[in-house]
Image (tube, rainbow, N blue to C red):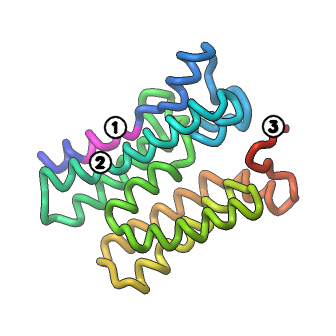
């Protein structure tokens, strides 16, 4: 029962949408009705500017880190609980109960979760993803590459099976949430970082 409550608590933590909250606080708007319609850091950059976007990015990453820290504090040696709490916080971010189950795409929170569970695989995948974003200015492409490479580096660096399974599930989440971006990328219509939404 304690572990179930822990997982639910992590889901509720994930459900706190900082992008939505800041857009309401700063401009009195629902950010999901502006820009790309996504409640995440990239759309916050488009709609609110750099300062709020950086803050949203940092807080969304911290949600992921916090979920794993909480899980480790309660169950220090049970990696399956760590993984389930990590998945719960990402699910909360993507489908937040507080905001009609319409959230972000989960990449920043995924970074927090996976960097805490398996730092080196996340670092290697992140370097490649960031390099790709720098070259192409497609945040969505970098995000998808990060999600796709995580399982590979987890296998190569010999991390536990539970973490590998979590990375695959997270990858499915990422590709599902980015399905519109994938279509736009294939059509050459995806917005680049720094460009206004069409």
Residue 182 in the figure: left or right of residue 125 = right
Q: Main secondary structure of the magenta part?
A: helix
Residue at the image position 38 percent from the left and 74 percent from the top: 164
Residue 118 in the figure: left or right of residue 58 = left
Among the 4 quarters of the image, the one containing residue 50: top right
Among the 4 quarters of the image, the one containing residue 46: top right
Report if residue 71 lies within the magenta region: no
Among the 4 quarters of the image, the one containing residue 79: bottom left
Residue that protrudes farthest toward the top in the picture: 28
Residue at the image position 69 percent from the left and 29 percent from the top: 47
Q: Secondary structure at mark 3?
A: loop
Choose mark 3 or mark 2, whichever is in front: 3
Q: Badges 3 and 1: C-beta atoms under 8 Å apart?
A: no
Location of residue 178 with respect to 53 vertically, above or below = below
Report if residue 8 lies within the magenta region: yes
- What residue did someone put label 1 on? 13
User: How far apart are the two marked residues, 2 and 1, measured between alpha carbons?
Assistant: 8 Å
Which is more N-terminal, label 1 or label 3?
A: 1
User: How far apart are the two marked residues, 3 and 1, measured between alpha carbons?
Assistant: 30 Å
Choose mark 3 or mark 1, whichever is in front: 3
User: How far apart are the two marked residues, 3 and 2, measured between alpha carbons?
Assistant: 33 Å
Location of residue 152 with respect to 95 vertically, above or below = below
Q: In the image shown, does 171 or 21 lie closer to the viewer?
A: 21
Residue 88 in the figure: left or right of residue 192 = left
Label 2: few (<14), some (14–19) or many (≥20) C-alpha neighbours in 10 Å: many
- What residue did someone put label 3 on? 196
Which is more N-terminal, label 1 or label 2?
A: 1
Q: Badges 2 and 1: C-beta atoms under 8 Å apart?
A: yes
Specify the label residue 67 is tagged with: 2
Question: Which range is magenta?
Answer: 7-14
Q: In the image shown, does 101 or 104 lie closer to the viewer?
A: 104
């Amino acid at each position: 029962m304690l572990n179930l409550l822990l997982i639910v608590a992590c889901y509720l933590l994930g459900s706190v949408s900082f992008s939505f909250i800041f857009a309401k606080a700063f401009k009195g708007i629902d950010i999901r009705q502006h820009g790309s319609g996504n409640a995440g850091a990239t759309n916050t950059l488009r709609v609110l500017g750099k300062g709020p976007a950086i803050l949203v990015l940092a807080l969304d990453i911290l949600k992921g880190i916090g979920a794993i820290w909480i899980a480790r504090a309660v169950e220090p040696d049970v990696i399956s609980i760590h993984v389930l709490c990590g998945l719960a916080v990402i699910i909360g971010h993507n489908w937040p109960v507080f905001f009609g189950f319409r959230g972000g795409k989960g990449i920043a929170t995924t970074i927090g979760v996976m960097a805490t569970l398996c730092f080196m695989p996340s670092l290697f995948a992140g370097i490649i993803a960031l390099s790709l974003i720098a070259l192409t200015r497609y945040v969505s492409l970098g995000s998808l590459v990060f999600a796709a490479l995580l399982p590979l580096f987890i296998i190569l660096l010999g991390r536990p099976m539970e973490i590998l399974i979590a990375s695959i599930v997270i990858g499915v989440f990422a590709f599902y949430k980015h399905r519109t971006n994938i279509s736009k990328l294939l059509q050459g219509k995806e917005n680049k970082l720094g460009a206004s939404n069409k």
